[in-house]
Image: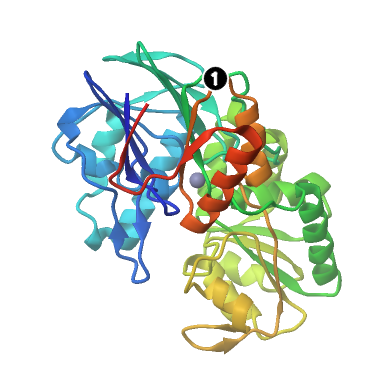
């Protein structure tokens, strides 16, 4: 069995891993990154006609955004959990709306691709050419999965983005006891540990309380897929009686989540939040949200656009208000700018509102990776992907020291024999 890293080698995002055997190739993820000018960066090319199938692990653009490229002239079978398929459609349509002129495919291709999809629940085994594979819960976002791929001689576990803690929307990854000769694991936070989730939640809620009870509005810019619904559920679980508004793609994805109760941990609380809180459906609602003290949860998470930017412009000047960032803030994004300088570009708007950042990461940290690896059986090789070289070096060292396992961090284009 050969593993070819087509993307996410010594970098975060752009996940694309091909497993090759004499009988063909199975592709796991085909994601896209965007550069500073929003130009797409695709993974290395692979010939669609060589593919026995494509597996999508979860509905984040850096895992699914380039997949339609494979369906322009061919149609390999596609596999993903039902939630992943539903959210992927919304996500890809949105990407085409925003960046359509830079992409070599359109909605028609996305529809063709999803027309080839098999909706695959966790743990159901699929036989495809020389491969047998199944999806395992990865605890990253609702519907997310790792993939256990087996051939006659070898077994490989690709965790994809994974998390081993419980969140409002997900149970921890369930991979313990899995037997695999090699594991491909993400290393996004390979050199750090996250604070305990209850501590972050507690701090988040008490900060919101201070703002709302002193008459301010707290803007919570959040990613549309999972993070927005997670913070909504964190608030709804405590039922604090505030005015809560939800705006942007967050609500569309939340609607999909409540259609898949089996994949969402506190499904009932999320469903209740959608019924009882204010869902913004137009400009009148947007104005109403700005009239009274409360909380506005809005896409996009890094304030690059979408309704969160609209609200920021109207809330930033008043020190009674707050901007509470709950997502990773990429380089050169307005969110990062605000944290570092107190100004939001491009208008150099001064932010007088209170600004705070909360670690709601859905990625496994260093101690999480060690825990996950310890619970697997017969692993001989660990392959790190989806991380910058610095974090990978620290994590690789730790895995070698603590577990004595051979650990590699292949670059994009490299092949590893298993
Ligand atoms: Zn992800």
Which quadrant, please, contains the C terminus? top left
For the question of whether residue 286 can be seen, the reply is: yes
| Residue 212 horizontal/vertical position (percent) | 81, 68
Report the residue at 30% width, 64% height from top: 39
Residue 94 sits in which quadrant?
Answer: bottom left
Which residue matches tag 1? 378
| Residue 274 horizontal/vertical position (percent) | 65, 46
Residue 226 appears left or right of 3: right
Report the residue at 36% width, 61% height from top: 34
Is disc 1 placed on a helix, strand or loop? Answer: loop
Tell me how the rendering is colored. rainbow
Q: Is residue 5 above or below residue 205?
A: above
| Residue 342 horizontal/vertical position (percent) | 63, 83
Tag 1: Cα neighbours inside 10 Å, few (<14), some, or many (≥20)? few
For the question of whether residue 310 can be seen, the reply is: no
Front residue of this view, candidates 290 and 25: 25
Q: In this view, does 11 lie above or below 68?
A: below
Front residue of this view, candidates 235 and 3: 3
| Residue 398 horizontal/vertical position (percent) | 62, 44
Report the residue at 57% width, 80% height from top: 313
Looking at this rendering, what residue extends furthest in the top direction?
152
Report the residue at 28% width, 52% height from top: 42
Residue 101 appears left or right of 249: left
């Amino acid at each position: 069995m050969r593993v070819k890293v087509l993307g996410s080698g010594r970098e975060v995002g752009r996940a694309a891993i091909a497993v090759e055997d004499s009988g063909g190739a199975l592709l796991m993820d085909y994601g896209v990154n965007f550069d500073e000018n929003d130009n797409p960066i695709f993974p290395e090319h692979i010939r669609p006609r060589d593919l026995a199938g494509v597996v999508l692990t979860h509905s984040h653009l850096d895992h699914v955004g380039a997949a339609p490229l494979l369906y322009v002239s061919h149609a390999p079978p596609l596999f993903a959990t039902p939630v992943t398929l539903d959210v992927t459609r919304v996500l890809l349509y949105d990407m085409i709306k925003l960046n359509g002129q830079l992409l070599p495919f359109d909605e028609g291709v996305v529809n063709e691709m999803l027309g080839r999809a098999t909706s695959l629940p966790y743990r159901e085994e699929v036989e495809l050419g020389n491969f047998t594979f199944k999806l395992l819960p990865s605890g990253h976002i609702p519907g997310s999965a790792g993939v256990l791929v087996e051939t006659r001689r070898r077994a490989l576990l690709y965790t994809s983005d994974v998390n081993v803690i419980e969140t409002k929307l997900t149970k921890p990854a369930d991979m313990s006891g899995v037997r695999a000769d090699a594991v491909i694991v993400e290393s996004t936070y390979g050199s750090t540990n996250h604070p305990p989730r209850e501590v972050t939640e507690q701090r988040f809620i008490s900060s919101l309380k201070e703002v709302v009870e002193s008459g301010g509005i707290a803007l919570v810019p959040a990613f549309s897929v999972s993070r927005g619904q997670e913070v909504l559920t964190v608030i709804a679980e405590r039922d604090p009686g505030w005015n809560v508004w939800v705006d942007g793609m967050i609500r569309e994805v939340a609607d999909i989540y409540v259609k898949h109760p089996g994949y969402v941990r506190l499904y009932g609380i999320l469903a209740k939040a959608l019924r009882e809180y204010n869902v913004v459906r137009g400009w009148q609602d947007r104005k109403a949200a700005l009239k009274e003290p409360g909380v506005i949860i809005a896409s996009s998470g890094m304030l690059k656009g979408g309704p969160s930017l609209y609200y920021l412009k109207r809330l930033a000047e008043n020190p009674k208000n707050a901007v509470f960032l709950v997502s990773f803030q990429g380089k050169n994004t307005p969110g990062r700018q605000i944290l570092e300088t107190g100004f939001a570009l491009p208008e150099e708007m001064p932010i007088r509102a209170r600004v705070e950042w909360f670690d709601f990461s859905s990625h496994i940290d260093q101690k999480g990776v060690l825990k996950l690896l310890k619970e697997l059986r017969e692993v001989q090789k660990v392959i790190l992907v989806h991380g910058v070289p610095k974090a990978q070096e620290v994590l690789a060292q730790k895995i070698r020291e603590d577990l004595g396992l051979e650990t590699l961090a292949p670059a994009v284009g490299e092949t590893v024999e298993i």
